[in-house]
Image: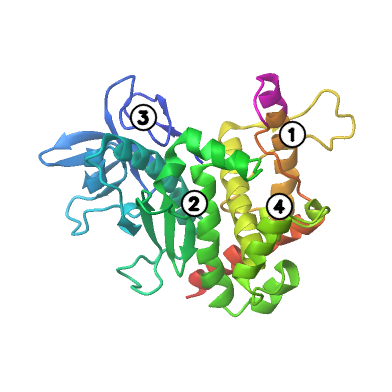
Amino acid sequence: MNLFNCQACGQMLYFENRLCERCSHRLGYLPDDDRMHALEAEGDAWRALGAPDALYKFCANAGQDACNWLIAADAAEPLCAACRHNRTIPDVSHPTALAQWRKIELAKHRLFYTLIKLGLPLANRADDPDGGLAFDFLDDPPEGAVMTGHDNGLITLALKEADDAERETRRTQLHEPYRTLLGHFRHEVGHYYWDRLVRDEDRLEACRALFGDERQDYAAALQRHYDQGAPADWQQGFISAYATSHPWEDFAETWAHYLHIVDTLETAHAFGVRVRPMVDHTGDLSARVDFNPYRRGTIADMVDAWLPIAFAVNSINRSMGQADFYPFILTPAVIAKLGFIHSLIIADRRAKTAA
């Protein structure tokens, strides 16, 4: 995530800010130029101080305080580039559901920030009714529970995942080291991009060489995983225990971690983070993020920067009595899988440039 500042007073801002606390300017994010803009009202529209040649309006979901993204004032589409992918939202007349949906949207907008900056395909259901990317945010019906998952571009997220206590209970029950709303989004969208970048681009054999043959029975593989658990040596070749259940899940888990790494490295780059431990005489745990991972750098560059930063932040978290910020191990086999995903994204970007 990049850093933002108020164009009126210079105050540093978070991506989620709606109002500058120093000068009280209304704020809105414009994905077209990746900037948070300080705004001034002009009739029924807004003029951005950093882009004064056009008028803007807020996404319609700003009315529920669920979005702070801008669109052109004369746009026929009332929703922003992120919100137009919503197919089903909860009943916002219920205060609890509204609060949960707002938390979900915070995570989803961070996801779209990354997808847009990577230049990935983002067809919605209006563009592609059969396979466009869409979201259902659903509460549990009386007769059962909503299962979070992906089906041909449609991602379903259980509304209860926005309840911190409920999500922590599920994390503990499933013996997971990490479970967040943003993690859910990054994982599930990995299934969507397996379809788009592997299946549809005829890269199946290259993918199978690293992740395994996805043609094995998916339901049976998941049941076997839940009955027997992961192999004892799973950390040698997989980013998580769940990744061992089926090649599709291995790809989605690895995809999620690629997005974790890219976005966090951009934040470190924006802050000028440098890690140079005083006891590190070899330099193995030293790093300086002197590149923007969205624009350049190999997977080796990313991993070389990531490992020292993750170790440093894990140590800081432990000093506060908190769990590790990144409780995962990047073995050579996992790094090779991350490299494959990196190559998919680079190839997609080059194909668009050539076209």
222 with respect to 235 (left or right): left
Name the amino acid, label 3. Cys
CB atoms at circles 1 and 3 under 8 Å apart?
no
Check disc 4 and report its element: helix, strand or loop: loop
* Three-letter code, disc 2: Phe
Residue placed most toward the observer, 141 or 257: 141
Residue furthest to the front: 143
Q: Name the N-terminal-most of marks 3 and 4.
A: 3
Residue sitting at x 36%, y 32%: 17
Q: Which of marks 4 and 1 is nearer the N terminus?
A: 4
Q: Which residue is the site of mark 3?
A: 6
Is residue 270 left or right of 37 when viewed as pictured? right
Q: Name the residue under label 1.
A: 311
The secondary element bearing badge 2 is classed as helix
Instruction: Magenta stretch: give its range.
Output: 315-323
Residue at mark 4 to residue at mark 1: CA–CA distance: 21 Å
Asked whether residue 341 is in view, the answer is no
Calculate the distance from the C-alpha at mark 2 to the C-alpha at mark 3.
29 Å
Q: Earlier in the sequence, mark 2 or mark 3?
A: 3
If you read the primary sequence from the N terminus, does the residue marked by circle 2 or circle 4 appear first? Answer: 2
Which residue carries the number 4 mark? 241
Q: Mark 2 points at which residue?
A: 185
Is residue 324 visible in the rendered image? The answer is yes
Of all residues, the one furthest to the right in this rendering is 281
- Kind of residue at badge 1: Phe
Residue 327 point in image, percent of width and height: 70, 39
